[in-house]
Image (cartoon, helix red, strand yellow):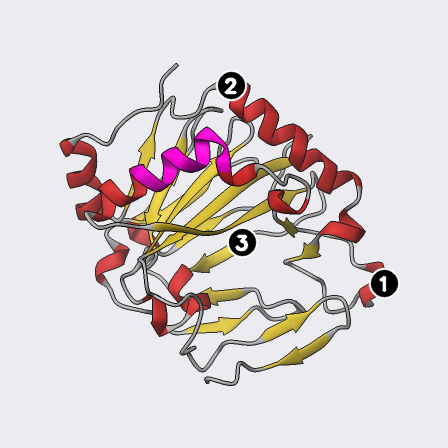
Amino acid sequence: MPYPEASDEQIDRFLRHGWLVVEEAIPAADLDLLERRCDKILADKERFANDWAWDAREPREARSFRIVQSSPRFVWREIADQPYRLWLTAFGSSLMRAEMTFWYDQFLAKPPGHDAPTRWHQDEGYWGRNLFDKGVTCWIPLQDVDAANGCMHFIDAGHRDGVLSHRLVEGVASDLLVCEVDESRAVAAPIKRGAVTFHHSKTPHMTPANTSAGYRKAVTNHLQAPGAGGEGDHYPWKVLVNQRTGERSVPPSR
């Protein structure tokens, strides 16, 4: 199955709504390989991962990993040359109508029965003003996803609302953020394995807790405009958390 090219209709929909589902985007064999690599992270998460929803009541040594947060590159040296990575960069550039370059990825896994929702947020809320209208994200689930196990939810056309005020999530020791949104505009995006979503860096999005019987696993891939400079010029709510030491700090540029 060849990787698809962005149609004019898809580009128009993305520009109007701030998000897009691409059906049958990634071949099963490529997903199988990606999932096998990510399963190595789950098998040794204390070594390779953070807990993005680290419960503040838990000491660092006893984190329950309610949201496993890592990167496939930690266990896959050749990942940059994989077809899916090359494709999503080209497709994301088409959607943004501007050249985009791969920036970084994350493996995000929610265990069954003991996880946490990923609260409403905008990627730019984490990244800072350097990425103002200069980012796009491709989210790749490694299984079918729906509201029960944590599919994407978007605020329709939320990329037109500017950067919303964020705050740290109460009771969480990581840097997990939340913003207030107009939930009457929320749209769930359940998709089958092989499909992906793209969203603009200003589009508010969230994934609910995983109430299914198995892990919900996904790889999120972040692209930025050339010369954007990556994360920086942060908003007042930004906090850095070192989960190896437990140290919390604020970015020097804030």
Crowd class of label 2 (few under 14; some 14 to 19; many from 20; radius 10 Å):
some
Q: Which residue is drawn at 79% across and 52% down?
A: 47
Q: In this view of the protein, which residue sits in the foreground, 219 or 160?
A: 219
Q: Mark 3 highlights which residue?
A: 118
Which element carries disc 3, helix, strand or loop?
strand
Which element carries disc 2, helix, strand or loop?
helix
Question: Earlier along the polypeptide chain: callout 1 or callout 3?
Answer: 1
In this view, 55 is above or below 17: below
Q: Tell me where residue 78 appears, x and y as whole percent.
A: 58, 37
Marks 2 and 1 sit apart, C-alpha to C-alpha, by 37 Å
Farthest-out residue, right: 61
Start-end of magenta stretch: 81-90
Circles 1 and 3 in contact, beta carbons < 8 Å: no
Q: In this view of the protein, which residue sits in the foreground, 83 or 70?
A: 83
Q: Tell me where residue 121 appears, x and y as whole percent.
A: 43, 60
Marks 1 and 3 sit apart, C-alpha to C-alpha, by 22 Å
179 falls in the magenta region: no
Q: Mark 1 highlights which residue?
A: 61
